[in-house]
């Protein structure tokens, strides 16, 4: 539904997200509607925000925080499977394949694969039988402070942590 092809595979997901138009649109929608009606789910490579829920670090097995993390990972595995089907259908997208084209041409190939994939889905074309799903990547751990702006107090981060704890207290205790 949204593809940002401007960055190489080595670019960090959080950087790509910050540079995407969708990031600003989601934040604007959240703020204009006083939030509390949608949340995006991200892995630990993304910054925690009121509209972007991410796992907690270093949880103890069996605790409410650990159950919260497991729930997020279970839900997020859906997108990992989607990526696996996309890459299996268009094998040039697998990480061990290398595009021998200019960056612009490689970006066009990625976009074309995504558009063709969506057409296949719309036409109910079954995915290839031999799905090769790559190992799930839940991102890298970020520091305990998340993505603090200018090393000052980030009110959004503080509010997001409070909301995250409310969700854990209400649904995972």
Image (tube, grey):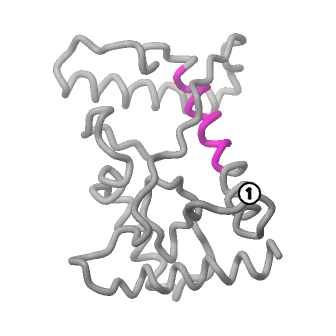
Is residue 156 placed above or below 20 in the rendered structure? below
Q: Position of residue 37 (x, y in %)?
A: 63, 78
Is residue 21 placed above or below 109 in the rendered structure? below
* Furthest residue toward left: 102
Closer to us: 81 or 72? 72
Is residue 47 placed above or below 167 in the rendered structure? above
Closer to us: 46 or 3? 46
Label 1 sits on residue: 71
Residue 150 colored in magenta in the image: no
Q: Secondary structure at mark 1?
A: helix
Magenta segment, which residues?
76-87
Q: Position of residue 118 (x, y in %)?
A: 55, 33
Residue 17 in which image quadrant: bottom left
Residue 67 in which image quadrant: bottom right
Quarter of the image with the C terminus in it? bottom right
Identified at 33% across, 22% down, the residue is: 109
* Mark 1 Cα shell of 10 Å, populated few (<14), some (14-19), many (≥20): some
Count of marks overlaid on the render: 1
Identified at 27% across, 76% down, the residue is: 149
Q: Position of residue 10 (x, y in %)?
A: 30, 35
Residue 138 in which image quadrant: top right
Residue 79 colored in magenta in the image: yes
Identified at 44% across, 68% down, the residue is: 144
Magenta residues: mostly which secondary structure? Answer: helix
Is residue 111 placed above or below 96 in the rendered structure? below
Closer to us: 35 or 147? 147
**Left or right: 24 in relation to 162:** left
**Left or right: 67 in relation to 78:** right
Identified at 32% across, 86% down, the residue is: 153
Q: Position of residue 147 (x, y in %)?
A: 35, 68
**Left or right: 67 in relation to 157:** right
């Amino acid at each position: 539904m949204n593809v940002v092809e401007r960055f190489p595979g080595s670019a960090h997901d959080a950087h790509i997200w910050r540079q995407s138009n969708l990031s600003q649109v989601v934040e604007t929608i959240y703020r204009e509607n006083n939030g509390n009606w949608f949340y995006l789910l991200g892995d630990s490579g993304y910054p925690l925000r009121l509209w972007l829920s991410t796992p907690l670090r270093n949880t103890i097995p069996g605790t409410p925080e650990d159950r919260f993390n497991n729930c997020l990972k279970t839900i997020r595995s859906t997108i990992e499977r989607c990526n696996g089907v996309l890459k299996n259908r268009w094998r040039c997208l697998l990480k061990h394949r290398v595009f021998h084209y200019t960056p612009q041409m490689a970006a066009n190939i990625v976009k074309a694969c995504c558009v063709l994939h969506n057409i296949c889905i719309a036409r109910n074309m079954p995915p290839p039988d031999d799905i090769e799903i790559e190992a799930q990547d839940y991102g890298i751990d970020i520091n305990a402070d998340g993505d603090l702006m200018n090393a000052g107090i980030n009110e959004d981060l503080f509010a997001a942590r409070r909301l995250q704890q409310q969700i854990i207290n209400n649904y995972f205790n």
